[in-house]
């Protein structure tokens, strides 16, 4: 599943995987970003300020700039070369699935595990953003510097 980030002022949008988004937030927090919480355009009795859903909530301009600043601090620590990560977690889990599951159910579970395997395996953000992915992170930093954006 992916998220679309939309800057209403510039009409620029970017699409990122959920794993990219969550790892970017994790990395930014480790470099000093303190999230102030998102805001909804429409009033709801309860809103927790989450960044992790795509409910059309808004990241304020100040928060977006603080996010970009924290991520910029991390760039020197992220390897420029691609890091080999063992994504074999899903195939290792195949043997652990109950025998009573149908083949279709096993496929659904394996697909779900594969979709979220980056997070399940606890890959460090340095590894996740190493090499080619670092350029995507730099693009994300530039996007954040444009100001407020919605998470769609």
Image (cartoon, grey):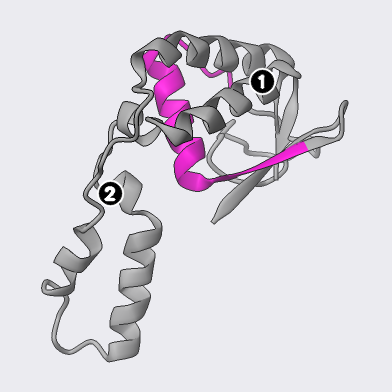
Res 142 label: 1
Q: Pointer 2: what residue?
A: 120
Q: Residue at x 60, y 21 (%)?
A: 141
Task: Tell me which corner region of the image, top left, top right, bottom left or bottom right, holds residue 53.
Answer: top right
Which residue reaches farthest front?
A: 81
Give yes or no for residue 40 being in the magenta stretch: no
Up-down relation of residue 106 to residue 85 (above or below): below
Image spot of residue 47 (x, y percent): 62, 36
Q: Residue at x 23, y 87 (%)?
A: 101
Image spot of residue 88 (x, y percent): 21, 58
Q: Is residue 36 visible?
A: yes
Q: Is residue 57 visible?
A: no
Q: Residue at x 66, y 20 (%)?
A: 142
Give yes or no for residue 20 being in the magenta stretch: yes
> CA separation, marks 1 and 2?
28 Å
Q: Which residues are magenta?
A: 13-37
Left-right relation of 81 to 33: left
Choose between 55 and 87: the one closer to the eye: 87
Up-down relation of residue 139 to residue 123 (above or below): above
Up-down relation of residue 83 to residue 70 (above or below): below
Quadrant location, the N terminus:
bottom right
Image spot of residue 128 (x, y percent): 36, 35
Choose between 52 and 103: the one closer to the eye: 103
Secondary structure under badge 1? helix
Left-right relation of 89 to 40: left
Secondary structure under badge 2? helix
Task: Tell me which corner region of the image, top left, top right, bottom left or bottom right, holds residue 102.
Answer: bottom left
Image spot of residue 132 (x, y percent): 46, 35
Choose between 59 and 119: the one closer to the eye: 119
Task: Tell me which corner region of the image, top left, top right, bottom left or bottom right, holds residue 116.
Answer: bottom left
């Amino acid at each position: 599943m992916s998220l679309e980030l939309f800057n209403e002022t510039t009409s620029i949008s970017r699409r990122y995987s959920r794993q990219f988004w969550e790892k970017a937030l994790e990395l930014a927090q480790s470099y000093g970003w303190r999230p102030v919480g998102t805001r909804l355009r429409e009033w709801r009795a309860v809103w927790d300020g989450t960044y992790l859903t795509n409910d059309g909530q808004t990241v304020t301009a100040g928060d977006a700039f603080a996010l970009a600043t924290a991520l910029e601090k991390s760039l020197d620590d992220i390897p420029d070369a691609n890091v080999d990560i063992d994504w074999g977690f899903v195939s290792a889990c195949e043997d652990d699935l109950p025998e009573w599951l149908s083949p279709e159910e096993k496929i659904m579970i394996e697909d779900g595990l594969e979709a979220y395997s980056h997070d399940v395996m606890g890959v460090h953000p340095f590894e996740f953003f190493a090499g080619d992915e670092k350029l995507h992170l730099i693009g994300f930093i530039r996007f954040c510097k444009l100001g407020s954006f919605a998470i769609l």
